[in-house]
Amino acid sequence: MPIKVLMPALSPTMTEGTLAKWIRTEGDAVTSGDVIAEIETDKATMEVEAVDEGTLGKILVPEGTQGVAVNAPIAVLLEEGESAEDIKPEDPPVSASAPVEGTAEAPEAASSSAPPVPVEKGARIKASPLARRMAGQKGLDLSAIKGSGPGGRIVKADVENARPGAKTPASAPAGSGPNAQQLADLLGMAYDLEPNSGVRKTIARRLQESKQIVPHFYLTVECRLDALLAARKDLNDRADGAYKLSVNDFVLMACAKALKAYPDANVAWTDDNLVRYKHADISVAVATPNGLITPIVKAAEEKTIFGISKEVKDLARRARDGKLRPEEFQGGTFSLSNLGMFGVKEFSAIINPPQACILAVGAGAQVPVVNDGRIEVATVMNCTLSVDHRAVDGAVGAEFLQIFKRLIENPTGLFVE
């Protein structure tokens, strides 16, 4: 009998996702392990592999559909000898949070040619789950939109074609005024809209929560890089092209070694306990087309500089391609964000919850320094530690930075226990 392909749970916290793209089309033969679709979760875009074999008989969820609940049918596989006639009609997949009501998106499209019917004031607004969700995302007032579906039902096309006047300040927090799009509409400003990805929405939510809830404080140190740059050049010259170590590889290793030497900084806060981690799992901030993601170098304190360099390059490449597994970017005990390659001298990063610390690394630059009463030219790098004051006190953060600075300025310490 036909086999249902269900929306997979690609992370422990996933309840719904967006079906970003179908890799296979109806009629294609599929074997176990074939990539058939790409799913966008709240954290990343990931590939979905077929579990069973057969022919892709029917695609139930079109590309671009948002809010598809975990375990909802998204397609049907036909086994040998079966045809499309064996496929039974399916209920439409819905958002994990949306009520099951009305018809699927396909009937909406079929009814879009019906004349618009106004929604009576005071009456229950008839709208499909998809239209309600889209209106909420765009900040539109459903009562101000005319429905073109049966009986005045508001459908997807009505929300897409809604005029700016359908917007209402009620979609913004009280007292905050109109959002950027609402203000642009009021002033007649020209603009284009780019829908926020699930990843981008999650980043925005988590960073907002972090700044609102976590009591940040910041500590900055200057690190002389001359000895580290000399050691890096020597190692890369010896490699003869076999590998190429970056300054960031040394910085990551210094973070891991400093956390091992001073574990009081390798902690996280909960209302009941202080979580003390036994390994330095370093999350490395990587910019991707969908937003920031932080793949993890696990137990970094146990790895060589060459192992760290190879792993970071692999994780960064797969992060940009959307190929990371959930366990490769969820968790971590400490974060590292380096904008030095963009010429940024110094910055303060936002803590990545539930972690307690993130180190922001700026660019190394040659500056005059005073050494034993003499002015010298040295390459100096500014590093700023953002700290959750609930878990890490100022003195603890300062002690950690002292050890980190010593390892950066005397890199031979990285290679001895």
Image (tube, rainbow, N blue to C red):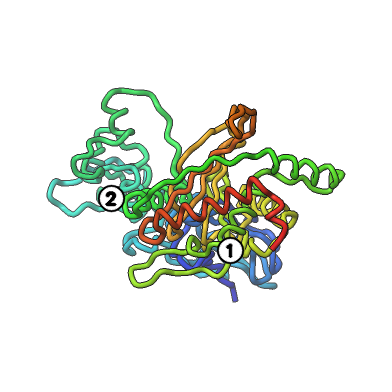
Side (left or right) of 400 relative to 34: left
Q: Position of residue 384 (x, y in %)?
A: 49, 44
Q: Position of residue 54 (x, y in %)?
A: 67, 69
The residue lying furthest to the bottom in this view is 1
Dot 2 amino acid type: Arg
Q: Residue 159: which quarter of the image?
A: top left
Label total for image: 2
Dot 1 amino acid type: Lys
Q: CA distance from mark 1 to mark 2?
A: 62 Å
Residue 391 seen in the figure: yes
Q: Residue 100: which quarter of the image?
A: bottom left
Instruction: Give the quarter of the figure containing the N terminus.
Output: bottom right
Q: Given contact means CB atoms under 8 Å apart, are the residues at marks 1 and 2 in contact?
A: no
Identify the residue at horizontal 85%, vertical 46% (top origin): 238
| In the foreground, 58 or 202 | 202
> What is the crowding at mark 1: few (fewer than 14 residues within 10 Å), some, or many (at least 20)?
many
Query: Which residue bears the numbered disc 1?
Result: 260
Identify the residue at horizontal 40%, vertical 27% (top origin): 191
| Secondary structure found at label 1 | helix
